[in-house]
Image (cartoon, grey):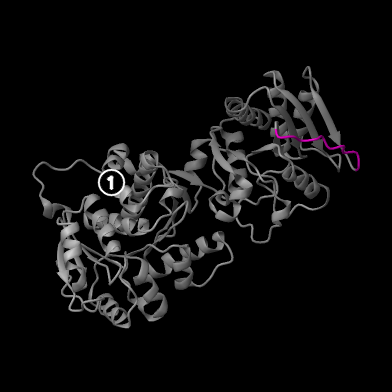
């Protein structure tokens, strides 16, 4: 997994690399600039005019080094160094001198009041190197004006490491009008946590991490709660099956789902469960759904609720490896009572989703009854109902982390980068998946997948992380076949087999 560090720890890791590789600071800047330039040249033509905006600090040092390397590569580059206090960091000063010594350089150093802004057109590319990840207060004055000028232009904007003005983590106190709106952000070594929040998408644009070979010992020894899931992390979870295994080897799942008008959710979740490898599945549904589920999905066994329309009671759950509840369940008062009886009577790990979460939110005393090691799979609004509203995605993520630790459960906070918050205080962010998965029933499929993995004996953390990544990978395969616009939830199920093969 790729560790995600706070910006202060990134600076510490830079220093660790400088001291222990060893490498000089200016050479580390050169390494980063060379990596950036290589990626930039792969993407953009020499037909474009390149305008580099550099600040006084180390982000500016990167920008000036990139300006030199692009000039040497034959690009038409104009560079502007903003130096209102006439004080540059040593690396920035050295790269300024190197740029000035480069043939065909077009360079302007801007002190107070002497900036004549170049006209920026649709064919121009701005390289933003004004401020890096060390920024801790909103941009004001002239720098805010430059940001506004760039944002109002039609030029393509590529930010170095992080868009100028954006804080690396919490932007709740930032000024959104003083942040560069990049089309592409090329980040060094690690993604910034801010990249994963929907409110920052318009600033970050597309992003890619460039490896600048930060010292591996420093990375290994520096603690962080955050990590980005990679496919190789999941591959080892799915082990080859024993030739002499049988359906009982892979667990018996119980899924409590469905109500009048919502048996489709039960079907989607049930199919996700068995397609993820569970050996046996019993679906507990109201009586009205018997013919629907039994006909559409004969592989699942049926347990009928005494009630025709909604969930009202459950029989003994001891024979099941894990229990899933929520898809299409409805929120009838009788269902809430049955949910409470279930929570009081079982210690089995549970996957709790959708209407089951809504009933828990409406009856707060049920929170304390959730078995430890269970997995909750809320979308942001469902989590807000459970834990209270948050002003932004960053605050919500921290609240989910605390919530998981307090209740000793796993919280799968669904979204573009689904976050898996564990009872141990770890947060795993998932990058598989696409906007085509924003379709009715997608979350029901995820519930089934995680339930199926949990029933096979996986630890809750492993089942949640692997299930989320598997779900997203199947969604990516489905989008290639159907397109994002045309995808429906059953397309994700149909691609689970190919997703397993790809991951393994």
Tell me if mark 1 has few (under 14), some (14-19) or many (20+) residues whose alpha carbon lies within 10 angstroms of its own.
Answer: some
Q: Position of residue 361 (x, y in %)?
A: 41, 75
Query: Which residue sits at x=49%, y=38%?
Result: 217
Q: Residue tagged by mark 1?
A: 494
Residue 115 painted magenta: yes
The quadrant of the picture occupied by the C terminus is top left
- From the viewer's perspective, tell me whether residue 244 is left or right of residue 235: left
- From the viewer's perspective, tell me whether residue 120 is left or right of residue 273: right
Disc 1 on helix, strand or loop?
Answer: helix
Per the rendered image, the range of residues in magenta is 113-122
Query: Which residue sits at x=80%, y=35%?
Result: 119
Residue 57 painted magenta: no
Nearer to us in this view, 112 or 301: 301
Does 462 appear above or below 404? above
Q: Can residue 8 be seen in this view?
A: no
Does 362 appear above or below 15? below
Which picture quadrant has residue 93?
Answer: top right
Nearer to us in this view, 389 or 268: 268
Query: Which residue sits at x=70%, y=37%?
Result: 155
Q: Can residue 287 be seen in this view?
A: yes
Q: Where is residue 265 in the image (x, y as percent from the top left)?
A: 30, 62
Report how many numbered discs are placed on residues in the image: 1
Nearer to us in this view, 232 or 13: 232
The quadrant of the picture occupied by the N terminus is top left
Which picture quadrant has residue 331?
Answer: bottom left
Does 409 appear above or below 152? below
Q: Where is residue 412 in the image (x, y as percent from the top left)?
A: 40, 59
């Amino acid at each position: 997994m790729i560790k995600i560090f706070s910006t202060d720890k990134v600076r510490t890791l830079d220093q660790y690399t400088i001291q222990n590789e060893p490498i000089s600071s200016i050479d580390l800047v050169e390494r980063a600039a060379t990596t950036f330039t290589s990626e930039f040249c792969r993407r953009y033509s020499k037909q474009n005019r390149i305008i580099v905006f550099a600040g006084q600090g180390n982000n500016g040092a990167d920008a000036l080094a990139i300006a030199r390397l692009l000039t040497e590569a034959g690009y038409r580059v104009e560079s502007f160094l903003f130096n209102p206090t006439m004080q540059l960091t040593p690396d920035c000063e050295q790269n300024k001198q190197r740029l000035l010594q480069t043939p065909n350089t077009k360079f302007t150093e801007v002190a107070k009041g002497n900036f004549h802004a170049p006209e920026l057109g649709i064919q121009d590319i701005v390289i933003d190197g004004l401020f890096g990840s060390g920024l801790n207060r909103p941009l004001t004055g002239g720098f805010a004006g430059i940001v506004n000028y760039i944002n109002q232009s039609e030029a393509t904007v590529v930010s170095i490491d992080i868009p100028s003005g954006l804080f690396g983590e919490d932007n709740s106190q930032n000024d959104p009008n003083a942040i560069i709106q990049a089309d592409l952000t090329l980040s060094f070594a690690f993604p910034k946590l801010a990249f994963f929040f929907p409110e920052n998408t318009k600033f970050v644009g597309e992003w890619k991490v460039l490896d600048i070979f930060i010292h591996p010992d420093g990375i290994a020894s520096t603690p962080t709660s955050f990590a980005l899931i990679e496919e190789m992390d999941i591959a080892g979870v799915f082990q080859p099956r024993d030739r002499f295994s049988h359906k009982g080897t892979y667990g018996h799942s119980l899924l409590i789902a469905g109500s009048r008008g919502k048996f489709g959710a039960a079907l989607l979740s049930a199919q996700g469960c068995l397609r993820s490898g569970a050996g046996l599945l019993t679906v507990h549904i109201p009586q009205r759904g018997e013919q629907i589920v039994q006909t559409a999905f004969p592989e699942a066994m049926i347990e009928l609720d005494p009630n025709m329309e909604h969930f009202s009671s459950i029989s003994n759950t001891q024979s099941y490896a894990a229990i899933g509840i929520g898809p299409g369940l409805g929120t009838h008062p009788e269902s809430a009572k049955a949910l409470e009886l279930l929570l009081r009577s079982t210690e089995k790990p549970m996957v709790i989703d959708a209407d089951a979460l809504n009933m828990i939110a409406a009856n707060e005393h049920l929170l304390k009854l959730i078995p430890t090691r269970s997995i909750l799979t809320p979308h942001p609004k469902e989590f807000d109902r459970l834990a209270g509203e948050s002003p932004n995605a960053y605050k919500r993520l921290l609240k989910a982390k605390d919530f998981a630790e307090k209740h000793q459960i796993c919280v799968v906070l669904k979204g573009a980068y689904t976050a898996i918050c564990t009872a141990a205080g770890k947060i795993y962010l998932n990058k598989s998946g696409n906007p085509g998965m924003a379709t009715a029933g997608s979350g029901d499929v995820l519930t089934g997948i995680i339930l199926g993995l949990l029933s096979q004996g996986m630890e809750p953390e492993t089942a949640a992380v692997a299930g989320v990544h598997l779900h997203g990978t199947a969604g990516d395969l489905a989008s290639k076949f159907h397109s994002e616009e045309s995808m429906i939830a059953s397309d994700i199920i149909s691609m689970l087999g190919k997703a397993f093969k790809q991951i393994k």
